Amino acid sequence: MATFLYKLGRFAFRRRNYVALVWVALLALAGVGAASASTPTSSSFSIPGTEAQKAFDLLEERFPGASADGATARVVFKAPDGEKMTDAGHKAEVGKIVDELSGGSGQVGSVTDPYTANAVSKDGSTAYVQVSYKVTSMELTDATRTALEETGAEARAQGLTVEVGGDALQATPETGSTEIIGVAVAAVVLVITFGSLIAAGLPLVTALIGVGVGVSTITALASVLDLGSTTSILAMMIGLAVGIDYALFIVSRYRAELAEGREREEAAGRAVGTAGSAVVFAGLTVVIALVGLAVVNIPMLTKMGFAAAGTVVIAVLIALTLIPAALGFVGKRVHGRKDRKAMDTKAAGGEETAKPNMGTRWARFVLRRPVAVLVTAVLGLGAIAIPAASLELGLGDDGSQPPSTSQRKAYDLLSDGFGPGFNGPLMVVVDGKANDNAKAAATELSDTVKKLDGVAVVTPSTLNKAGDTATITVIPEDRPSSVKTEDLVHSIRDTGGEIKADNGAQVLVTGSTAMNIDFSQKMNDALLPYLALVVGLAFLLLMLVFRSVLVPLKAALGFLLSVVAALGAVVAVFQWGWLGGLLGVEQTGPVMSMMPIFMVGVVFGLAMDYEVFLVTRMREAYVHGERPGEAIVTGFRHGARVVSAAAVIMIAVFAGFIGSSESMIKMIGFGLAIAVFFDAFVVRMAIVPAVLALLGKKAWWLPRWLDRALPNVDVEGEALRHRLGDDASGGPDGGPGADRELVRV
């Protein structure tokens, strides 16, 4: 592989005009496609195989035109103190609003009158209007959404409190200005790392080109593939982070090759042949982790994973082609003035003073005290992981919105006036088509459900036109996200099983609350298989890279430690509220259900980046004759500064998304940022060298039969060095390998 990438790097350097033109053309083509693409008509959310989804599908079939998955809204009214919503003036005002909503948009399916639908509280202080739409929330037009938001302006003037809740107000998430701050921080780190504005600008510009191509392509295909707005944000988040990192490693290796006295084209080829190999395998681990999300079998999550994986592939291709092409344009300016002066001094035969850098000093410190460093790092991450034991999973509803929003105010008004369960009604579907007994089965079910614990109200059943399917609405006593409500859903399903055994009618429970419960269960069930698949494939991939069994095992265990610690931090901030004010977390609540599996996938791929970049340099030194301890120091001398810079950049980019208005994006941004911090600076910088120091030569052990069975992908460039004459006897210039004996492991 190294030889092929070496040739690719030299080709891109020589034909830089054509390579740059191709990428600019791809960017323009993707941009035109995105600009001309129609707005996505839907952003469906389905969970195949769950009872809630089966019920939704059945409702679509048996109640045509009812739009079971359509957007909903609730306009909640509260009368001033001493007055009631049943007062004539207030009734007239609510009636006007009902008429306005009914005729205000063709997307409105139905609007209920609270005075005929029993939607007035017992004390008469509160009432609500239920609005059902024919389309999903993402399909609502701006005019429809605006009309809903402005509902009740006159009623407020009359002294009524009017708040609007429901998923109809769900809007496209905004990432905020902190995303730009994240890129700015990345720019500063690159300038400090390279000491050259040109070298710092290359990773930023090329990463932005890659993200532009990826996100524009996603936008262009959003309508065709039914991609939600969150998909492009995730692709941007990951694509920007890895794009900068991969370019950073290529540019850094190119500068090192120039410092060794190589010609520019040769340096570009060697940089792509060596660091490029690590980029390819690091990218593969990220792609495996993202594509592996398909195991969960939730279409929305699968599409998000594939889209983000596509952006990562583009980032790898740009690092291998556009970066060497761009290096051909910038010339010697890739080095700062200080570095150019030192290179000129060396070329003139002068003495070069080289002091041990921070990476070298740290590696030597760890080698002196490996046990102390290992114990301190493990105990520290273990302490941070403690809150993860209190992890509560769920999907956010209006109750998890910030208290200042209209949705949260409407939620609280309903809870106070009717009970918290009114915010999460359960829809029970009775399918009696097989035995033509829907009505009788629904009556039996209603009588039984009324006696269950946790039930506040059971509405009379409603039959479809064919008379073969009935629906019943059950209002729980507790809030939608409570354990008591979850137990009630299971109790109704158990009751449905008994009814099916008696008369053959099938009972299904659905609604947003039941859908959230099924979603959380599906995520929990998929976590272990997904973890086994991703870690297993990546373990095999890392065995190919490192020709070792213990190094990939150490990498996987270190990842698990960092991801559990990151989950502990997420629980502390988003569930317990620690530092919530600092991070803009206005409302605490359960951690979203997809967070653990999502962090496992994304963080594992990103964590392996640093493992590959750092440890391949150690293996390269070991293979070329250095003792295990010396190889660790060499790896840190060449890689620690760059890995640290890459980690800070990735943390800055992810942290930039904490400013998003969408709680899911905010949580993902924080979780990924803190996980990268733990993995890069605690696991890879402390635990990895400590473990390798304790293992010594055993770290690079591989059974002979496995060594023969595994293909040699030559990540460290051993075959490339032989081809170029840079073998153990020294390169043509008597380089660093002159006094080394080649060691085979």
Image (tube, rainbow, N blue to C red):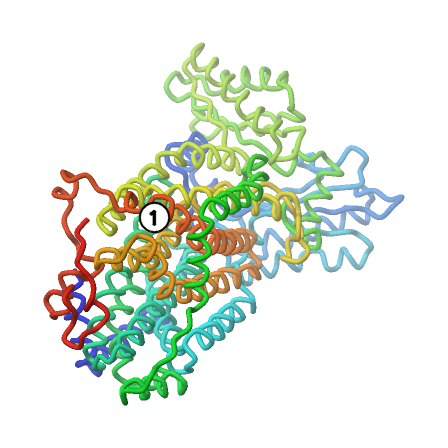
Badge 1 marks a residue whose secondary structure is helix
* Residue under pointer 1: 289
Location of residue 200 with respect to 362 vertically, above or below: below
Which one is in front, 101 or 271?
A: 271
Q: In the rendered image, which quarter is residue 449 located in? A: top right
> Could you tell whether 523 is left or right of 310 in the image?
right
> Would residue 139 be seen by someone viewing this image from the given angle?
no
**What residue do we see at 36% from left, 59% from top?**
633
Location of residue 372 with respect to 179 vertically, above or below: above
Q: Position of residue 295 (x, y in %)?
A: 33, 40
Q: Position of residue 620 (x, y in %)?
A: 25, 59
**What residue do we see at 70% from left, 51% from top?**
403
Q: In the rendered image, which quarter is residue 434 located in? A: top left
Amino acid at dot 1: Ala
Neighbour class for label 1 at 10 Å: few (<14), some, many (≥20)? many
Which one is in front, 448 or 256?
A: 256
**In the image as oriented, which residue stretches furthest toward the top?**
502
> Could you tell whether 120 is left or right of 677 in the image?
right
> Would residue 387 be seen by someone viewing this image from the given angle?
yes
Q: Position of residue 302 (x, y in %)?
A: 35, 47
Which one is in front, 94 or 187?
A: 187
Quarter the N terminus occupies = bottom left
> Could you tell whether 587 is left or right of 53 in the image?
right
**In the image as oriented, which residue stretches furthest toward the right?**
82
Location of residue 357 with respect to 535 vertically, above or below: below
Which one is in front, 696 or 258?
A: 696
Q: Position of residue 196 (x, y in %)?
A: 41, 82
Location of residue 176 with respect to 47 vertically, above or below: below
Q: In the rendered image, which quarter is residue 281 located in? A: bottom left
**What residue do we see at 86% from left, 44% from top?**
83
